[in-house]
Each structure stands twice: as structure tokens, then as C-alpha cells.
Amino acid sequence: MFSSRQNGYNLLLFELYMEHIAAINNLTFKYHSYTSKQSANIFSDTSFLLEKGVIQILYGRPESGKTTLCRLLAGLIPMYQGGTLSGDITLGEIQIREQHAFQLLSKIGIVFQDPEEQLFMPVCEDEILFPLEHLELSHEEIGSRLEQVIDFYDLQQYRTSNPANLSGGEKKRLLMAVLDAVDPELWVLDETFEELDINWREKILRSLKERGKSVLILASKDIDLYETYGDRFGVIIKRDSGNHIEFSGREHAIEVLGDTLPSIELSEVLYAHERALCNMTGLQFTYKHSNHDFLISIDALTLYDQEVLALYGPNGSGKSTLCKILCGLISPNEGKISIRDGEKMRVASENDLLRHTGYLFQNPDFQIFLPTIGDELKLGLTRMGIQSSEADQRIREATDLFDLGDVEQPPAIMSYGKRKRLQAAVYYLLERKVCILDETDSGISLDDYAKILELLKGRVDAVILITHDMRLAEACSHRIIEMKDGEIQKERRLCR
Amino acid sequence: MQMTLFQQGNSIFHRFDPRAKILLLLFFLVYIFLPFGLIVHGTVLLLLIIASAVSTDWRDMFSPIIAIWPILILIALLTPPFYREDPIGITIELLLRFTSISYLFTLFFKTTEMSMIILTLRWFRLPYNAALVITMALRFIPYLGGVYHQIQDAHKLRMGSAEKINRFYQKIRSLIPVLTSVMIYAIKTIPELSMSLEHRGFGIPRKTSRLRVYKSLKNGHKLFTHMGISVIIAVIFILTPSIFN
Amino acid sequence: MEERTPNVKRQISPAFKVSSVAILTAITAVFTLVVRIPIAPTRGYINLGDVAIYFTAFTLGPITAMIAGALGTGLADIIGGYPQWSIISFFIHGIQGFAVGAVMRGAIGLTEQQTKLSRVRILIAGLLGTSIMVLLYYLAGAAMSGFGPALAEIPGNIIQNVVGVVGGLLLTRAIYRAYPPVRDFYW
């Protein structure tokens, strides 16, 4: 098996035997540092080949540089995100470095990990038409390709809707349709399959295989179907000096990818009336959606002291809305929420709830307001009536615990995982009774997630986590509540 | 956030070719400013109100007036002191003019879809990049509006209260962190969006005329007829005032 | 500070220009539509559209400020239900944005000395932007609704501009600290 340790000479030999579509030689890359500290290498001296006509799976943990790799392949970096690049990337005969990204339109196509970054048209149809109109095709050809992909990816009913209103899986299908319409030589799918349901995964993978496409799939989790459809398996090996990519077979790759679940120690919870923290009864809320109204209705739900409660369910099942009611951002049409006040429970006002519950939004950027970590952590503390010197002391403690480093750093250019840790540190300092983690597990490393959960669990009385991942819910919680269509479908206590 | 004034419908105003419609809009815009006297301008306003009632739900007939009543009161109060001769006549003239302009624009945007307007402007030789900017802005306005509300929620949650802040200065101060956050988010989108655009082929020099015309307005007999009708309407409106004089 | 690779200059591609104008147009419209502070007599509120325009002029330059100011406020008027003002807003805020951007020419000071220099410029730019906006709105208002109501709008417009300059400046300072790559966005 080909290994990255081979040098350029061996690579040359190798090329004689294998037909490859892309060759990456001695790739080293790091982003610009905008602070006084040097930034670390993302990749260091790594080489590999991508073969023609096969489906290759490249595993990598969150934040191991998958997205950076995609953008390097497509010539988008360091053009738009400054950095230092050395080594060669060649697609067939073409040196990526010497090209503009738009010249590669028919050579390489990516489905970005975050659809929000890739969709820019107000109508789905235009999203597909945009690249086609840059391909110099005839009218008839554009029309037939459009119809073909709309048909295959089942987007007929969304032709004229706004892509922003689609669900996560539908957005991925739309982006697959865009890519398919262009049909480049190399398809790069950056964690595309995670959000698609099983039928779509199978349908797309099968068609890619049948059509003999050259595909690179980047994945942070293993999916059973990869075993059936994948031809080559590789993994990004994390190293402090810069990551390394090795195509060394499925078993090795999965072994390097390692554990995908954090191990959390959970204390015992007493499900007794006098240990209740928060009580919801008869909640009703109608949510105005663009084309239909959506009703959330919760008969009774109690949160207990020291509990970790997992809310599980598909997108649009009302998990986030329920949590927004719980922290006072939305007032329900009917029903009441009581919170513990000493020995008794009392009905909580909106302001009570705002002070009672902390909420880590899924997107940390919506909760970071100020230019530096220090300012950010201080915001809200002074409002609580804490002296400045005391506040500084606490902020130091929190930056150490959450491993945030220098307080003068601007959050906007920190890594995603670090921004999530900052978000958690904020609520750690604010000392709320309950803390909600809204899909905090997506896009960050296991270590970061375990750290956030452990620290917050020790500080607040109860934690609610929202997740799509049943295995994660089972590993980290006392109780799992499954929601569907705005109602609680199943409640399950786990033995601890 | 309601994104547009446009209301679905099948009235004659909806079906009228947008290219002819935009020219008629410009014609009436100039017409309203020309000195034809109260009777003509009053008639124009009346026709516009009727058109508004016919074009969509008739109950929305007076909604433009509801939107502008404060300024109408101001006109009524503040105009007379400025004129010695015929203050009442001039005030009515100004009231009619402002109301007509409001009706005219509302009627146009109520019956013409934004994407149609962009295609029309493209037909009138608006550069491709300009049309692309408007199109993308229309996608990002509701999105960033949503982001603004989420960030505002997050700020409320952080400060732990929803007290109504009444003082002007305090309100501005509490806005700054929210605006900063929205702005950072928006600015960070720029490189992402550039990448996405270029990755989809934006930047390829335009080589053939076939490009970028898949969706465009067709020139046909409908356009010809509607342009003709527009010219006739314009001529009628220019000639009729002489009857009154 | 690390040395910059030559790639940084390449960043200002046509795609980048189109994206920055589109995003700032959207932001200008959102600031105009969403943030309304009740005060001015005629339209009943002042909006923060000018904060976005001054910010754009300070950080991204005159061309972006011109197009984003023009389209952003014009679209906001159409969406927000005041379409009769859209053409007027389009031209006036376009001119205002261009003038402010042209006077500033990216001279937002980051060091102590630069700050002193740029203060004069900011003052001139602010005064110019304010007078252009107030004067042109007065003339346009006079044509549409007579001199009286147009005069009544002046105090509100002045306040809106002062808020715009101060807010735009605060925002610019904050963003330069919070997101250093923005330094390379000027064109």
C-alpha cells in the first residue's frame, strides 16, 4: 500500500502504475496569524494521490483540516484565507497554484460542509443554473441538465423556494444537485452524508459508483455504507507539528479515527418531587412558519437536580423552541414554568427564566459580542454586581479551566472548538442554574466536548443537551427525551 | 421579516409586461409633477386608488394612506404658512402629489416580483454584476435579519433581563455589542461568499452571447402589444388635460 | 506580526468585490429595517442605515459604500413599505457613501499618531456626509411634499447622521480589533 513516507522519486514511479486524478506532493500549509503568536501548521510535508474512477473515503476528526484540504484542492486557499503554502497540488496536468479557482470549474467540485457558506441565490433553481451558465453550454443542454438533477435529487417542489428555508438534508441534496449538474472530474464531498438520511446516502453512493466517478469523501464519523461503496480509505493523522494524510486501508483508518464518544462520569440523580429544579406544565406554543403553523405542546416535564437530560429528535421537532421557552426567550401561548426558590417552587416570570437558564446556541458566533476574550467574559459579570478585581480573578480561572489562553485574543479568528469553549466559559462564569447545550457536539473534537460538558456539569445544577446522535445521548445523560412534531414521544431513564 | 411588498395575483397589472410597466411608472412619475391643475391630479389619484383596489385585495385599498398619514398631516399643517397666494390650493396640490406617488410605487411593487424587476433591468442593459449583487443581497437580507434577531436574543440572555430601556443613550449603548456581533458575522461571510462564487465559475470571461441568458425576458408580440398600449395611455393622459382648460 | 505572502493582494478579485458589495448592501438594508429608534417626526423613527454606510465607507472604501449605500437603503425602502422614497434614497445615500469614502480613503488610524491625523479626516467626512444627506433630502422632500415637511425632517436627519458617524466609528474600531483580516478588505 502506498504510504506518505515515500519520497518524490517513489511518487514518480508510482504514477507509472496508477492512473490518478490528483497528486499532492509535500504539502505544508498554515494560516496567517493575526496575533503575536505564530500559527501552527495545519498540514506538514504530506503527500498522497487521489485515484481516478474510485470512491475514496478520508476520515478525520473534527478540526483536523478537512475543510482546509478541500479548499486547497480547489485553489480557494490561500487566495481568500491568507496562509503560507508550500508543495505541489496537481489535478491531472494542471498546477493548482497557477490557476484561478474559476478555471477549475469542470475539474473539481466541492460540496462545502456548511451549506450556509455555499448557497447565495434566493431561489433553488438559480443556484443550479449559476455554474451552468458559466460552462458555455447551449440553452438546450442547460435546460436538460437542470431537469435531470432536479428529478434525481427530488427537488421539484423546491424549485422556486428560498434555499435558506430548506432543512439541513435538503440543502445538502441541493448542493449535490449543483455539483452533479456541473459534473466535474473530481467530486469532493465534505461531510455531506452525515445529514442525509439512509435512503439518500445509498441512492447517491450507488449512482456515483455506477457512473464510475472519482470521488473524495471526507468524513468525521464512520458510516456502514462506506464499507460497501468505498474503494480506498485514508485518514488524517493529527500531529502537533502538522497533520499527515495516509491512505492505509479501512481498518487502520478507523483505528486512528478512534473513539467517537466521550466518557463522562455521571452522579446519581434522585427523581423525587423535592429534588425538582424546574417544572413545565401544559405548555402550548404556535410557531409561525413560512407556509404552515407548527404547534409545540408539552403536557408535563420536570428537570431534576444534578441531572443531565438529553433531548433527541430530528430537525424541526421543536427541541430548540422548547429550550427557548425554557430560558424565557419565547413566551408560550399557554402553560407555566415553575422554578425552585429555596424550599418551594414558584411560577417564573420571563426575567426569572432569563436569569435562571443559560443557553449555548448551536452557532457560537451569535453569542460572541466583543473584540477580545477578556471583554467577552466580562460582559454580564459587571451586571451581576461583581467588583472589577474579583471579576478579573474569575476570568483568569475560567480561561485556565477552558484552556483559552491569552485574554487579548480576538474570538472571531480562533478555531471553532475554541469559540465553543469560550461560549461555555461565559455561562460557567454567569452561574446559571440550568445550562442548555444546543448541538454543541457538532463540529468540535471529542476532547473539547468532554471538557465543556464536564466543567459545566460541575458548575450548574442541571444540564440539558440537544443532539442528533443517539449514541452520544446514551453515553452522556441520565434521561433521554425523544421529540417529534412538537411533542414528547418517548421518555427513557438510563441505568447509572 | 416580510421580504417584499409583492402579492400574488392575476390582475391585469400582474400580467402586464414588466418592461412596459416600468416605463409607465416613469411616465406617471413625471406626469404627477407637471402643472395640470387640481382636477387632473385628483383624477389621477382616483384612478390609482381604483387600480390599487383592482390589483389585489380591495381591503388593502387604503393601506398606502395608512402608511403615510403622519406626513400628510405635516403637509397640511406646515405648507400654508409658506405661501401667500392660494395656500389652500397649493396644500391640496402637494397632498395629491405625495399620495399619488405613494400609490404609484406601491402599485408597481405590489404587482411585480423582485426577480422580474431584476430581469427587466437586465433587459434594459443593467450590467450582469449589478444584477448579481441585487440578487445576492435579496438572499442575504432576510438571512442577516434573522441573525440580528438571534444575536439580540443571545444578548438578552447574557444580560439576564428584558427590561425595556427607554433612554436614548442607553438604548444606543446596549445596541453596540449586538451590532458589532452582527457586523463581524457579516464581514466573515465575505471571503466565504467569494470562495463560493469563484468555485462556481464566477470570473470566467464572457465569451459567447449564449451565456447568462437562460432565464431572460422574451421579446414577443406580448411585449409589442403592451408597449403599444403604454404609449396610447401616455398620449391620452397628455392630451386630456387640454379638454379641461 | 508574520510577514504577508503576496497572496493577500490577490484577494481583491472580481468575486471578492461582488461579494463585499452584496453583503454590505444586505447589512445596510438590515440596519435600516430592523433597528428603528423612535424619534424623528415624519417617518417616526431614525434608522441605523447610516451607521452601516459610514462603517462601509471607513473600512471598505468609496465604491462599496456608494453601491451598498444606494442599493441597501433603496431596497430597504421597497421592502419596508416606503417605496416612494426608494429612488431618492438610492441616489442620496449613494452620493453620501461615496463622498465619505473618498474623503477617508481608508485612513482609519490604528496607531496613536495615525489617529490624530485621521481625526480631522473623520470630522470632514462626517460633516460632508451629513450635509450632503441633509441637504439633498431637504431638496427631494421639498419637491415631493413641500418645504414645510421637508424642513421638519432636518433635525431627525442630522441626529441620524451624528449617530451614523459615531456608531460607524465605534463599529469600525471594534471590528478592526475583533477581526484583523478586515484590514485587507479595503479596495
Image (cartoon, helix red, strand yellow):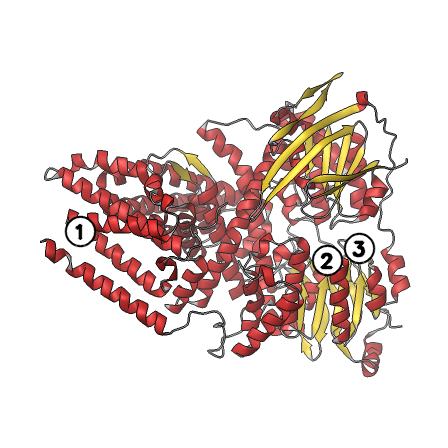
Image mark 3: chain: A
The label nearer to you, 1 versus 3, is 1
State the separation of the CA atoms marked 1 and 3.
Answer: 74 Å
**Residue bearing mark 3:** A61
- The answer to which of marks 2 and 3 sits earlier in the sequence is 3
Of residue B10 and residue A198, the one placed in the foreground of this image is B10
State if disc 3 and disc 2 touch (CB < 8 Å).
Answer: no
* Badge 3: residue crowd in 10 Å (few <14, some 14–19, many ≥20): many
Q: Name the spot of residue C104 as percent of width and height, x first.
A: 42, 51
The label nearer to you, 2 versus 3, is 2
Of residue A112 and residue B109, the one placed in the foreground of this image is B109
Of residue B216 and residue C122, the one placed in the foreground of this image is B216
- What SS does tag 3 mark? loop
Name the amino acid, label 3.
Arg
Image mark 2: chain: A
**Residue bearing mark 2:** A196
Q: Which residue shows up at 70% across the image and 60% down it? A: A68
Q: Name the spot of residue B93 as percent of width and height, x first.
A: 19, 44
Of residue B1 and residue C35, the one placed in the foreground of this image is B1
* Co-location on one chain, circles 2 and 1: no
Residue B88, picture quadrant:
top left
- What SS does tag 1 mark? helix
Asked whether residue A100 appears in the rendered view, the answer is no
| Residue furthest bottom in the image | A16
Q: Name the spot of residue C46 as percent of width and height, x first.
A: 40, 38
Name the amino acid, label 1.
Val
**Residue bearing mark 1:** B40
Asked whether residue A12 appears in the rendered view, the answer is yes
